[in-house]
Amino acid sequence: MDYMDYQNTANAVGDCLLSYTKDESGWKVCKKSNDVIVSWRPSTEFPGNVYKGESVVKGSPEKVWECLKPVPNGLRVKWDNNVKKFELVEQVTENVTVCRTVTPSAAMGIIAPRDFVDVILVKQYEDGTITSNATHVSHPSCPPQSGYVRGFNHPCGCICVPISGEPNKTQLFSFFQTDLGGFLPRSVVDSFFPSSMVEFYSNLAKAIKSLKDH
């Protein structure tokens, strides 16, 4: 893929995720915990589900984004149990990168360590919304590696929306739409995502709180 292909793919993901936040139809709630609601609907991208998490998070959009932003040596590898390593493969433009994410084994070892190669667009909207938008790509310097099952993210990411009159709160949407690859029982996949998304929000809340203390 060349520079324009990556840019176009990334832009399409941005549009796709924004449409997920606006389209209320077909979502079924599968988990509620504290202030987090996780829902799903069948994916139109692959034979699996797209999962949506939504919650109002304590912390300004800037603080929330500081914990989420997809950069090497960023905070996310420190607090997100599902991100073991995050590497920059190519800086395509100022706002578009190709990155490799390594995830640890999960579900008591049933899900082996995986890696994902994605194009990622960071996009800010006029109302102050900040987003990360990712989907799988292939990259010549990142072929599948031994020891990792190569998984494939379909349009996924995070959308941090400011709340009018509440500068220290953020509405955070998260979308996961992942083909984990390998031969996993469907039941394992279907139980893994809702619970790991709830954990994602609670670990994020702790990370934001620790930012405030510094």
Image (spheres, rainbow, N blue to C red):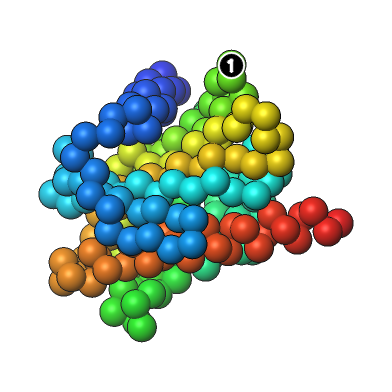
**Residue 124 screen position, x and y as percent:** 57, 24
> Seen in the image, is 1 located left or right of residue 89?
left
**Residue 98 screen position, x and y as percent:** 48, 39
Q: Most extreme residue toward the right, as rendered?
A: 214
Q: Is mark 1 on a helix, strand or loop?
A: loop
Relative to 25, say whether 126 is above or below: above
> Which quadrant of the view contains residue 110?
bottom left
Q: Tell me the residue that label 1 is attached to.
A: 126
> Seen in the image, is 89 located left or right of residue 8?
right
Relative to 155, say whether 58 is above or below: below
Q: Nearer the viewer, residue 73 or 32?
A: 32
Relative to 76, say whether 95 is above or below: above
Residue visible at 39% across and 28% down in the picture: 18
Does the rendering let one see residue 83? no
Give the position of the C terminus as an image quadrant.
Answer: bottom right
> Which quadrant of the view contains residue 65?
top right
The kind of residue on which mark 1 rests is: Glu
Residue visible at 43% across and 63% down in the picture: 33
Residue visible at 31% across and 56% down in the picture: 151
